[in-house]
Every structure is written in C-alpha cells, then in structure tokens.
Amino acid sequence: MCRLTEGDQDSDPERSRSSGEVCDEGVEYYRAAVQKGRAARADAPRCLLELGLLAPAMDDPDSLIPIPPAVATATLAHPVELRILEQQRELAAQRALLSRMEGVYRDVRSDGSEAVQRLTRAPVIAAAVENAVQSAETELLTAHPGGGRPEEVLAQSLKNTLEACRRGVRQRTLYQHTVRTHGPTLDYIKAVTDVGVEVRTVNEVFDRLIICDRSVAFIPDKEREHRDHALKVTDPGIVYFLVSVFEHAWDRAEPIVYEPDQHRPKVLTDETRLHVLRLMVDGYTDAAIASRLGMSTRTVATHLKRMSDLLGSNSRAQLAYLTAQSGLLDGPRPPG
C-alpha cells in the first residue's frame, strides 16, 4: 500500500517528487480520478502525489484532481533542467579555463623540449641538424642509405665533419656497399678517413639516422609522404634504442680501407651479388631490391644476369631453383 495522509507529506516539495514507479493501485486510482474528475484525498497513493499527477481541488481541500501527465512531466523536468543548465555552465567555464592553460602549455612546449619533435621543410631540418652537430662534444653516429650522395651535400658534410674532428668528436658513418663505386662519395670518404673518421658499408642500411652525443637523434618522419619531414628525438629510451640499432649494423659492416697503391677501396661485388640473389629468391622484385640496396634496377638486373649465366638459367623461376640446388645461399642469412 502507498497511502499518503495530510501529515505524511514531505516539507520539501522538490524532494517529495521522486522518479519512483507508479504502483498498480496508483494506476487504478488515477484511472478512476480521470473518469470522475476528482478523487478522495485520504485514499491517494503516495506515488501519484510524488509524480505530481494529483493536486488539491480549489473548492474542496479533501479532494484531489488528476493532472495531465504532460503537465506533470513539465513540472518535474523544470528543476532537473535547471540543474543541467547550471552544470553545462560550469563545464563551459572549466573548458574555457583549460583552453587558456592549453595555450600556456603549447607556448612552453614549443621551445623544442618535447621528447619527439616534428620538423617540417628542408631548411628547418637542415638548421636543426647543423645546430645539433655543431654542439656535439664527444660522438657523432650517422647512417646514410641509398648509395652515393649529391656533391653539394658532400661538400657541406665535409665542412661539418672536419670542424667536429677539430673539436675532438669521434665520428662513425655507415653507408651501403654501392657507395664503393660512386666517385664523389669515395673522395669524401677518403678525405674524412684521413682525419680519423671511421666509415663502414653494409648491403642494407636500416634508414637515415644522425645521433649526437647519444642524447639527440634525427630520423625520417614516416607518417609524412613528403621527404621534407623529420623527427628530432631526445627521449633517452628511444635514443638508446637507436644507438643499439646503429651498433648492431656497425658490427656486421665492412670497413672501407685504402691500400697504399689503391685510389679506391675494393668493391664487394660477390657479397652484394649474393645479397641480390637472396632477395630475389625471397620474392622481391628488381625495384624492391634496388630500393633496399641503394642501387639502380639496371644494376640489380645485371647482377641477376651474371648469376643466370653462371648457373645456366633461362628464367627467374629457374634461377631461384638452381640457386637453391647450388647451395650458394646455405650460409648464415645476413641481418636485416
């Protein structure tokens, strides 16, 4: 039973109206009240009064008249709407405050203190790299994929490298084997190795990389399609990982050594050719092999033609089969 007498009413009208369910007795009481136009106050179920579905009759304090549900809903919703409005105002004020503080945060963080900072446009990247290289005090580690480098780039790099040598900075550089046939790059390598820079080559270099004093690194921004995007990394954990990757490649790389009677170091043709052959057997196209090894597709085709002539192959599929039969690739797989 959910009766309500005159002395049982809650003194707070807001609290007296709850969101409870209407009991079965209340449904029947309300139906009868709507049919008769009024009902006795003493028999009124509490749930109807809480929901505002009954109101005292003006001409008879002992009677109640039914209120349309739409009117009762509007009456109940009004204080809720007021609370929601107030909360929306508070939320808007908080967002405005935090938006202002977001501006402060961005201003402070824009000084380059982020662990990973995006650099856009070639002049910006070049300036950031040059500043880091000129500030290096102990060590420079660099990796350059893709074969020979443009002469204007080599000229600027030679200037920076010699300046770092004069400051006593140890420098190690990784190239791909294909630079051993590129005259301008070899001339650069000869000049820097004469002053103590160590240079080695591998078949595959992971990607372009510059690490200064093991505290700041520059790598390509692979999320951008254009090449004029780079990442400046200062997070110690990430830099440590990049140094480890460099050291792993360095350990398996071949030093570039000039003999007294040589103008150029010996080209590692056999090793490169076997690497081309292995990638072909693994299913790579000529273009993919060329991209990985920093050479032209024509050079890849030449290597495969030489191996086809050696093994007596007439097709790419037959070359793969004869290579497997020959045992040429039975040795340890190169890293990468």
Image: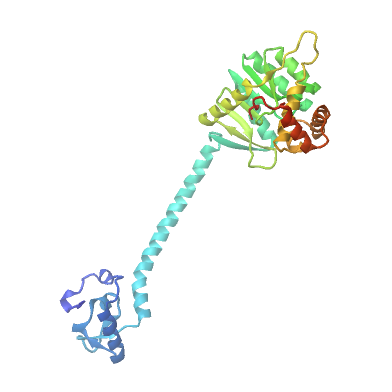
Residue at 72 percent across and 20 percent down: it is 158
Instruction: Name the residue: 39% across, 60% down.
Output: 87
Instruction: Give percent across and percent down for residue 95.
Output: 46, 53
Residue sitting at x 39%, y 64%: 84
Residue 70 relative to residue 246: left or right: left
Q: Position of residue 208 (x, y in %)?
A: 66, 30
Q: Is residue 329 above or below residue 62?
A: above
Name the residue at the top extreme: 260
Residue 261: percent from the left, percent from the top?
Answer: 80, 8
Question: Percent x, y for residue 33?
Answer: 28, 87
Front-most of 185 and 114?
185
Closest to the observer, 324 or 231: 324
Total label count? 0
Q: Is residue 213 visible?
A: yes
Q: Quadrant of the N terminus?
A: bottom left
Nearer to us in this view, 310 or 94: 310
